[in-house]
Image (tube, rainbow, N blue to C red):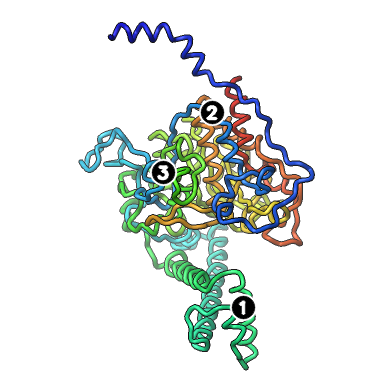
């Protein structure tokens, strides 16, 4: 029997080799017609949940043509790759993520031994560099806590702190004011969940209350009272945490971790709880993981970009506050050393005390042929202002000089509205520092405790693009990280129109000037170009 098997293997070698050589993709790339009609009707529920997968030409929605890309890939072989999600943690028990969670097969779970000798005990599904820590200061607050050294950086941090503190206090006052008005309307209508009609029928004599009533009528014409309550509650919690933790110079969120964050060689810290101490604290990372990998076509929630082709490695390094450079650097190295081919980093900050550690980690990833995809940020900022530098970390252009590597991709966010509102009103941009744009408005994906939510930000645009990168690396493993980066940039849809920056119709700019490529990532075109490049 063994002989026969060997014989068949020899006899069929040429035939099998011929079968394994996949046919060349001959489809033409998508190009935007000059006469394309933008979608004006509201998105259906299904379209809203899946718009990033849809197609501008076919569906009149500026998604990434993911569904069409899968048509090209039908019956083709792929190899599962690992995607490292460096984030706030991932709910690895979520039913739409559990089948795609990476498992370290070299580690024996629960034996309290570092079986694979990688320095991390029982790291079965990744590593948690934050341990049981949840909240953290912003970086400029940490700079202030070290004392006034007379440096320009300290003065800049102090000015930033004063500004942020004033704004947070002002926002809290606004939220409290809105909550008080809501309470008055509840009392006057006798209902907690009053309606637009209840407000219209409500007689008030106070001019200020009448003005507030008209404002509330406007609000409830677009969202329900329940949604309003949820948004107010979320905003209140956000700014309370901002004041209590992020801006509080007396708060120490690091002591529980037990390491020295200023010593890159102090590496024996953290634990293997890749979700984190509280599941809800992993909301951001769970959503990011879902965008990349939630199981496709299983009638649960939404669909991941590359779900059937990837495994998600959770590397927890992003707290509620600013991440430490040490954690980011070690998280990147961990993901690289344990087999990740794509790393998503949906985080960032404007101050960095040890940026060299992160630069070294990015270069290390480049040496190991790993692509890093990162979010551009949500402050509607030009990251390349004329005559100055809007530093945002991490980045790949140390001191705004030549890029330190060719494996780092920075992603801005677009909306589902093809026209002047195409760029998300919150998205950062920059002709040098931002490489491409991807879907980042109202993205539907997994959240902890078996839930799904719409979230938005460049944090959502980055994993959309990382998912396409993973798809390419899965089907075309011979392509390098650098090649995949340039495929994503070169094959995207070139947008030749002006868009409103920060949602301001008075501030119009050519979309082509908002990033290096001037394009939005398109999975269909990327697969066509990847197929072509893989045959050279």
Q: Judge depth for marks 1 and 2 and give the one in front.
A: 1
- Residue 331 disc label: 3
**Numbered disc in front, either 1 or 3:** 1
Measured Cα–Cα span from mark 3 to mark 2: 21 Å
- The residue that mark 2 highlights is 480
Q: Quadrant of residue 69?
A: top right
Q: Nearer the viewer, residue 484 or 58?
A: 58
- Residue 453: percent from left, percent from top: 48, 57
Q: Which mark is residue 217?
A: 1
The answer to whether one can see residue 469 in this image is yes
Q: Quadrant of the N terminus?
A: top left
Q: Residue at x 60, y 86 (%)?
A: 201
x and y, in percent, of residue 63 in the image: 62, 46
* Residue 285 visible in this rendered orientation of the protein: no
Q: Nearer the viewer, mark 3 or mark 2?
A: 2
Q: Earlier in the sequence, mark 3 or mark 2?
A: 3
| Mark 1, other Cα within 10 Å: few <14 / some 14–19 / many ≥20 | some
Q: Quadrant of residue 330?
A: top left
Q: Relative to residue 68, is residue 34 drawn left or right? A: right
Q: Quadrant of the C terminus?
A: top right
- The answer to the question of whether label 1 and label 3 lie on touching residues, with beta carbons closer than 8 A, is no
Q: Which one is in front, 272 or 202?
A: 202
């Amino acid at each position: 029997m063994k002989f026969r098997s060997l014989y068949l293997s020899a006899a069929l070698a040429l035939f099998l080799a011929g079968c394994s050589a996949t046919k060349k993709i001959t489809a033409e790339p998508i190009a935007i017609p000059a006469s394309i009609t933008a979608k004006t009707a509201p998105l259906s529920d299904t379209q809203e949940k899946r718009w990033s997968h849809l197609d501008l030409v076919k569906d009149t929605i500026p998604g990434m043509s993911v569904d069409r890309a899968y048509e090209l890939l039908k019956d083709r072989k792929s190899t599962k790759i690992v995607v490292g999600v460096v984030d706030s943690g991932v709910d690895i028990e979520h039913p739409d993520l559990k089948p795609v969670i990476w498992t370290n097969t070299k580690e024996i779970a629960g034996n309290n031994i570092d079986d694979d000798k990688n320095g991390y005990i029982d790291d079965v599904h990744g590593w948690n560099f934050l341990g049981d820590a949840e909240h953290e200061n912003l970086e400029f607050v940490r700079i202030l806590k070290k004392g006034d050294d007379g440096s320009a950086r300290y003065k800049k941090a102090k000015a930033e702190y004063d500004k942020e503190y004033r704004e947070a206090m002002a926002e809290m006052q606004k939220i409290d004011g809105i909550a008080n008005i809501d309470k008055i309307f509840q009392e006057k209508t006798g209902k907690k969940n009053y309606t637009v009609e209840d407000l219209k029928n409500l007689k008030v004599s106070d001019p200020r209350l009448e003005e507030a009533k008209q404002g509330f009528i406007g609000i409830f014409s677009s969202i329900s009272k329940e949604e309003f309550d949820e948004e107010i509650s979320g905003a209140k919690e956000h700014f309370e945490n901002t004041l209590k933790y992020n801006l509080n110079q007396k708060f120490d969120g690091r002591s529980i971790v037990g390491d020295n964050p200023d010593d890159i060689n102090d590496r024996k810290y953290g634990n293997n709880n890749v979700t984190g101490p509280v599941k809800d604290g992993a909301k951001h990372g769970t959503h990011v993981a879902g965008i990349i990998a939630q199981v496709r076509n299983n009638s649960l929630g939404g669909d991941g970009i590359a779900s059937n082709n990837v495994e998600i490695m959770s590397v927890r390094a992003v707290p509620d506050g600013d991440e430490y450079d040490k954690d980011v650097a070690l998280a990147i190295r961990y993901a690289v050393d344990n087999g990740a081919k794509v790393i998503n980093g949906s985080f960032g900050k404007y101050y960095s005390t040890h940026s060299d550690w992160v630069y070294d980690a990015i270069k290390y990833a480049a040496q190991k042929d790993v692509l890093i995809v990162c979010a551009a940020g949500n402050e509607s900022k030009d990251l390349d202002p004329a005559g100055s530098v809007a530093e945002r970390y991490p980045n790949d252009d140390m001191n705004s000089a030549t890029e330190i590597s060719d494996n780092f991709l920075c992603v801005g966010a677009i909306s589902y509205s093809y026209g002047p509102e195409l760029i998300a009103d919150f998205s950062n941009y920059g002709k040098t520092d931002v490489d491409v744009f991807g879907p980042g408005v109202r993205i539907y994906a997994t959240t902890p405790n078996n839930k799904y939510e719409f979230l938005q930000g460049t944090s959502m645009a980055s994993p959309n693009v990382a998912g396409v990168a993973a798809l390419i690396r899965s089907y075309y493993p011979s392509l390098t990280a650098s090649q995949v980066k340039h495929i994503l940039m070169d094959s995207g849809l070139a947008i030749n129109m002006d868009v409103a920056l920060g949602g301001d119709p008075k501030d119009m700019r050519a979309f082509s000037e908002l990033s290096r490529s001037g394009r939005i990532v398109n999975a269909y075109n990327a697969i066509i170009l990847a197929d072509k490049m893989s045959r050279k």
